[in-house]
């Protein structure tokens, strides 16, 4: 080890939705490289931000490779992925670092490829001499695969949803990386997978996951040689082989302890499998509450559960927009909707003009545009910096964006599905949430963090590609899986990673 370790940092952050009919390309990705990558990360509320701060504090030299991030969405175009993968691997080959830290979501989808992060990690691994450690920290909705856990020496997840602890997870993985750079042996990661889809009630501060995480903390408290336990509630919208729920336990090599802890927590998830059914507020109940409440400058912030860009949908549902416009004229509402054609047409019409336009519902296969006479209020490039705390300091891009008004509705019409979990998506377009009775966010969990100071937050039960119901999707690779298939006793796949090779020993829960 050198006196001052050189750590190559980079990443690919994208949660895939296998059933979106859109793809994710360069236009959707925010890419930073080199010194700019390190400078942005240093102040970011992200996994990479936490890692870069921890590495810097420990005296490491940061070498920026490439970091690419997009909002959740359809599969990344194959050529785009391969270009990014090769750029990270080439940087690892050229810079000969003492260690590598990659910020990965862990549930990306790539056109024509089953396991994008596994492929990326393997490419980085083979680009360097044996023994150079690689660490990553993932979103807890990831699908950690055997290829990922084989290639990475350290692989852990954040623990909270909404993800208030991204930076903590990044910092922890970075510290574990530095211990390997300093000469400690590679830890062993024991993983247990089971075929289970969880669709709702996925917050960790309450409900069934709060109980499972309490059990996790109790195991950690009584078993000090456990370095990390991560519980992966793999996104329901990824159709990948082997995806289910996963628990990983990282130890110095005590695989009996690790296996016992991982299977105990997997059983805790399985035992609660029917407690994850939706208990969301019907839209009319939410609007009725908004109409009867005294606002005092605090709008009711509605998460559009069925059209969550933050779960990978196009963000073009018009259900709430149409309902508010038609049935609730007394409610002033600010609502984002993705529609590049409408944005372009309104921009061409000019600010101050009134133009008859169909808005939204164009990207989803079952969408319903809303036709109206819209006044064009504002036109911009859709770029802003998220204020967080979720992803604070990170740039975001809505593409060409117009603000349109008709009746009681202000529509923020974006060209790209965007990060409307952050109030700055509205403010940067001249829309002050406090002027409205209703503000709609295309998010189901994380908007609660970033809108906490704006007004009360509520998730409404809207239909769409991010409102999981058994039978909604034609899973092909993720089968059999409960509740899509009847499974009485789940097969648990247990594997250990570390040293030279992975080992597998399928077990069954008794
Ligand atoms: Zn997540």
Image: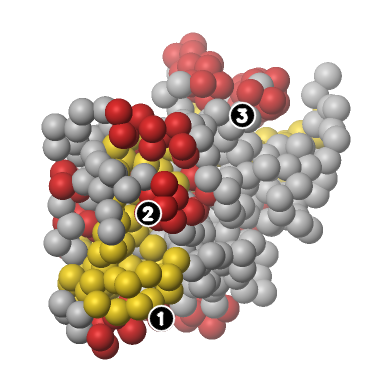
Residue mark closest to the camera, 3 vs 2: 2
Residue at 52% x, 71% y: name it: 363
Residue linked to disc 3: 276
Secondary structure, mark 1, is helix
Query: Does mark 2 have its CB less than 8 Å from ligand 1?
Result: no
**Real-space CA distance between mark 1 and mark 3, rounded to the nearest whole angstrom:** 38 Å
Position of residue 429 relative to residue 259, above or below, is below
How far from the left and from the top, in percent, is residue 192?
67, 35
Total labels: the figure holds: 3
Residue at 61% x, 64% y: name it: 366
Residue situated in front as seen by the camera: 296 or 478: 296
State which tag comes first along the sequence, 2 or 1: 2
Residue at 18% x, 70% y: name it: 377
Secondary structure, mark 3, is loop
Disc 1 residue crowd, few under 14, some 14–19, many 20+, Cα 10 Å: some
Q: Are marks 2 and 1 in contact (CB under 8 Å)?
A: no
Residue 98, by quadrant, is bottom left
**Real-space CA distance between mark 3 and mark 2, rounded to the nearest whole angstrom:** 33 Å
State which tag comes first along the sequence, 3 or 2: 3
How far from the left and from the top, in percent, is residue 27?
39, 78
Residue linked to disc 2: 325
Q: Quadrant of the N terminus?
A: bottom left
* Disc number placed over residue 341 in the picture, else none: 1
């Amino acid at each position: 080890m050198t006196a001052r370790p050189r750590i190559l940092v980079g990443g690919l952050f994208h949660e895939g939705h296998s059933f979106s009919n859109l793809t994710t390309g360069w236009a959707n990705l925010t890419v930073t490289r080199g010194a700019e990558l390190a400078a942005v990360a240093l102040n970011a509320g992200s996994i990479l931000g936490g890692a870069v701060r921890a590495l810097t504090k420990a005296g490491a030299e940061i070498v920026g490779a490439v970091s690419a991030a997009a909002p959740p969405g359809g599969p990344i175009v194959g050529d785009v992925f391969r270009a990014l993968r090769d750029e990270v691997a080439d940087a690892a080959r050229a810079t000969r670092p003492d260690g590598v830290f990659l910020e990965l979501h862990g549930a990306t989808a790539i056109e024509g490829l089953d396991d994008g992060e596994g492929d990326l990690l393997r490419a980085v691994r083979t680009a360097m001499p044996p023994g150079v450690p690689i660490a990553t920290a993932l979103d807890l909705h990831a699908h950690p695969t055997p290829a990922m856990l084989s290639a990475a020496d350290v692989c852990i997840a954040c623990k909270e949803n909404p993800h208030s602890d991204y930076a903590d997870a990044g910092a922890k993985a970075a510290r574990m990386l530095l211990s390997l750079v300093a000469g400690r042996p590679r830890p062993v990661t024991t993983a247990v997978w089971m075929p289970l889809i969880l669709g709702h009630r996925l917050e960790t501060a309450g409900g069934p996951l709060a109980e499972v995480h309490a059990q996790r903390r109790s195991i950690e408290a009584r078993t000090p040689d456990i370095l990390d336990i991560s519980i992966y509630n793999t996104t329901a919208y990824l159709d990948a082989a082997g995806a289910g729920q996963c628990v990983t336990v990282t130890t110095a090599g005590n695989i009996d302890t690790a296996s016992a802890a991982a299977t105990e927590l997997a059983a805790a998830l399985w035992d609660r499998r029917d407690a994850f059914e939706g208990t969301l507020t019907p839209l009319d109940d939410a609007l009725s509450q908004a109409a009867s409440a005294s606002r005092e400058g605090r709008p009711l912030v509605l998460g559009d559960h069925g059209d969550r860009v933050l779960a990978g949908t196009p963000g073009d549902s018009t259900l709430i927009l149409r309902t508010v416009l038609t049935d609730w004229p007394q409610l002033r509402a600010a609502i984002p909707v993705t529609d590049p054609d409408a944005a372009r047409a309104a921009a061409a019409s000019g600010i101050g003009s009134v133009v008859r336009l169909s808005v939204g519902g164009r990207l989803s296969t079952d969408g319903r545009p809303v036709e109206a006479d819209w006044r064009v209020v504002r036109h911009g490039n859709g770029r802003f910096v998220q204020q967080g705390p979720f992803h604070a300091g990170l740039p975001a891009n809505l593409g060409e964006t117009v603000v349109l008004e008709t009746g009681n509705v202000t529509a923020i019409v974006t060209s790209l599905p965007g990060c409307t979990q952050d109030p700055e998506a509205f403010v940067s377009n001249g829309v002050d949430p406090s002027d409205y009775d209703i503000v709609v966010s295309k998010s189901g969990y994380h908007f609660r963090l970033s809108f906490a100071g704006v007004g009360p937050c509520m998730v409404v039960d809207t239909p769409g590609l991010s409102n999981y119901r058994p039978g909604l999707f034609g899973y092909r690779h993720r089968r059999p899986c409960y509740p899509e298939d009847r499974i009485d006793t789940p097969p648990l796949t247990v594997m250990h990673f570390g040293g030279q090779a992975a080992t597998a020993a399928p077990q069954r829960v008794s």
